[in-house]
Image (cartoon, grey):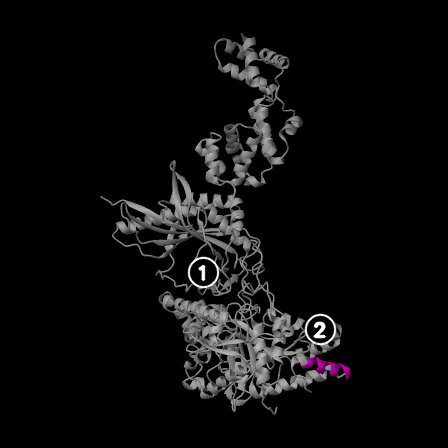
Amino acid sequence: MLPEFETVIGLEVHVELLTDTKLFCGCSTAFGAEPNSQVCPLCLGLPGGTLPKLNEKALEFTIKTAMALNCRVAEEITFDRKNYYYADLPKGYQISQYFYPTGRDGYVEIHVDGQTKRIGIHQIHLEEDTGKLLHVGSIISSPFSRVDFNRAGVPLIEIVTEPDIRSAEEARLFLQKLRSILQYIAVSDCKMEEGSMRCDANISIRPVGSREFGTKTELKNMNSFRAVYRGIEYEVERQRSVVLEGGKVIPETRHWDEEEGVTKAMRSKFVSADYRCFPDPNIPPFKPSPEWLEKIRSSIPELPDARYARFINEYGLPPYDAEILTASRELADFYDAVLAGYNAPKAVSNWIMSELLRLLNSTNTGIEDCKIKPEDLGKLLQMIDNGTISGKIAKGVFEEMFATGEKPEKIIEKKGLTQISDEDELSRIVDAVIAGNPGSVEDYRKGKDRALGFLVGQVMKETKGKANPQLVNKLLKEKLG
Amino acid sequence: MNYLNCSIEQLATQIKEIQDKSTPPQEVSRAIIGRCTGVQKEFNVFISLGEDIISSELERLFRDRLPENGRLKLAGAIGVLGDNIATSRYLTTCASRMLQSYRPPFDAGVVARLEDSGAVIAGKTNMDEFGVGCSGENSYFNSIKNPWNKKHTAGSGAAAAVLAGSAHFALASDARGELRQAASYCGVIALKPTYGRISRKGLLDYASSLETIGIAARHIADLAAVLGAVAGEDPDDVTTLQSAAPDYLSLLRENGGVRQVAVPANWQDAPYLEEEMKDLFQEQLKKLEALGVKIHFVELPHLQYASLAAAIISAVEAFSNLSNYDGVRFGYRGEGKHLQDMYAQTRSEGFSSRLKKFLTFGALVSTANYYQDYFLRAQKLRTVIAGELEACLQEFDLLLTPTTPFQAPELGAAEGGSGRSREELLDPAGYYTAAANLAGLPALTFPLQAAGLPYGLQLLSKKEDELTLLKAGLLLEKENPLAWPDLAL
């Protein structure tokens, strides 16, 4: 019998912080600028120009993240140097928090198969990003390399999980939840495609029931949530094959190749690098005051998990709806705002999940750029309820609102879309339709119920869809006996 | 013209005379440049000499600044800077092939303060490569010679320039005592201030946690004036002290100061301590006692390990601080087949073998294997030594020691491997000086004249208390007439 294996995954996630300036100098962190246009003596590592000045905003964001991920926050903030040589590292060392990370021992909860699972956070620390190497073609064949130092010194936090993740799906769920939390507290935009969120995975397998860890490989270069999922799936399968064929997993760094859909060994040997870390003598230790910490704590909004629970308990939403609505803070804010003026939780949820998300996706628009005001969606739904317009007309109005941002009553008035609920007026039209369709009338009277539908359709056609459908039904049945 | 020989205080009279006689400033410049060029020729104290800068700055000073602002702290004073202090108008080479053509696009924090005070920066002085050591021989620009005796080292160009009268003062780095040692070898006064008293912005330091910019001068009052001009908090250096620096010069001659003085009970245990130094030291103690100062011999059991601890810590920091010299963005670049090869060639060819030995030592003791036993132990020693010194200086006004155990060694001694050679690792010249760096305390060296080369007396005081050092220095100045070599240039 083939042995059953358990997958063990730990993630190292790097997230660029949304500060205007770099971690230790005043240079801009804006993405996409002309290469080497956002640099100074400090972030270029020029001799005599390297005295760092800590960006307090970056530290605030790190502490906020640590709190949001349920970590203990260090009493004293210190920085260390990680020494190594690479062309994208201007000072020859990276300033990081090696000995005392800002946050320790936290967790993030994910929902897997209807269960809540806790993924431990080993630590969160603040460090500076490196520059970027630009090669001509591939790194191997490139005759030379260019370096862009715009990114050098941009504040990064590294979030290291415990080896608590058991599948590619869990890894993806964790990353999505992490992104969601970080977006809620507005410390990062977490765009994997732009590199503002990057993820490495330490992957191993072991026989089910074993308490020891198997040999792990480190998987890099996964630039989307999908890539994380596919990369891990592939690597786990690869390790299984190696073990089942009697081989041994080699501890190595592997590269996810998106195009070929495989992982490839990057270095033949896994050299455990000695970074010779020691405290940075140019940055005095810093003790955050209790007042400052309290201020940071009180600035944390309701987080996805709390909101998810509230949407279920208070609004009676199904977990599926609550999960989707709370994944983004802006969407959840939008939902809450609609409910403030129109308290029908499930109806609003349906409209957002079907109509709004469809339009956002098809136009590639973010909810934050949506032109529809929450109170206007409420108004629109109210007008369906009180019979001003039909549900079908409402969809058209909604699209118009989405395109122009106009108020629903304006659009309805402008286009004359108000529902006809006047019995006398409808009665005249119904009479005309009965007179004009003797065949269908005959069919109906012979017992073909479908004929009634046709006649309703004719009335709707005459009224350009504005007739109140319930009223039309009632009138037709009365008149046809 | 007596412009360079007089003190900064006396300079006011000189300047008034020049103004009264309407002497053209060019004449003053010519005299200064002449002196500097002569000193350079004999003793190799400069790496850059700013002939044009001296002329244009003095002219501007006499034309615009002096008439408008007669109260400039350092009006017309001539200063020189060690070549590891960044200047945008001069090359800043650190006496290394690595930076032989490096001109920083910025100035060190002290440069603006000096210029605002009316001082003229005449040039950049020769030094041991990157400020490591005090042999004065490990410069890409050749050895520095002692103006008292050209066969001996001067320790640094900064001290030698001041001694030889090519400047009123010099600023240079002091990480384990280099500036104080050089001042002792040359017989001038030097102060290493409290860590953080003077901004390190723009200092190409090799040991950031130990190193400060210090001042060398020929007179205590000059030292006080320069310190007053350059000291103070700098928002660009977060390690600077937040407390305001006092007006040293105006407080210098106020009453009060030195009553109780401590001397390490085992002060004579230093390796290579010369008999002449012992005699001079004891003579000074007697002089102080005669003035009513009480001398106390105190136990400072860990002081003897200071220079070793400082060597380890400074080597680790240097290995890291100097990691930016990779040939990618500035400085010397070696030819290499690929990136790693280019690094290796750049650093092999750009650094001297003595510096490389030091950096290698730093790289070694910071590896995971040795971190605990060397670096961490050195850091613990540092805490213990700082504690001993602080406790001692809570009780006593000053701590007195020799500055170096011996006078300026002969040039070439380091290469010859004689006993007290200026080994960077086991640093006998730093036996007394390194403790002040480890503890961040201010320390002053005062010259003691001898028949041949001078010696130095070192004074330590508590943190931020440079004033007590200066007052004690003034007392010593009255008791010990200073002497200068008679140079035929």
Disc 2, SS = loop
Q: Which amino acid lies under the numbered mark 1 shown in the image of this protein?
A: Ile
Question: Which one is in front, A51 or A321?
Answer: A51
In the image, residue A445 sits, relative to residue B128, either above or below, namely above
Q: Chain of mark 1?
A: A
Q: Mark 1, residues whose alpha carbon is within 10 Å: few (<14), some, or many (≥20)?
A: few
Q: Kindly identify which numbered label has been placed on residue B71.
A: 2
Q: Quadrant of residue B231?
A: bottom right
Please say whether residue B4 is one of the residues in the magenta stretch: no
Image location (x, y in percent) of residue A295: 54, 47
Pair 1/2: label in front: 2
Can see residue B141? no
The answer to whether mark 1 and mark 2 are in CB contact below 8 A is no
Residue A56 seen in the current view: yes
Relative to B14, is B463 above or below? Answer: above
Could you say which is closer to the camera, residue A87 or residue B162?
Answer: B162
Same chain for the residues at labels 1 and 2, yes or no?
Answer: no
Question: Considering the numbered disc 1 on the image, is that residue within a helix, a strand or a loop?
Answer: loop
Please identify the quarter of the rendering in which residue B299 is found: bottom left
- The reply to whether the magenta stretch includes residue B13 is yes
Label ID, residue A139:
1
Query: For this rendering, which residue is in front, B81 or B464?
Result: B464
**What's the residue type where badge 2 is placed?**
Arg
Horizontal side of residue B125 vs B439, given as left or right: right
Region rendered in magenta: B10-21
Q: What is the tally of numbered marks visible in this picture? A: 2
Look at the magenta stretch and give its main secondary structure: helix
Q: On what subunit does the disc labeled 2 rest?
A: B
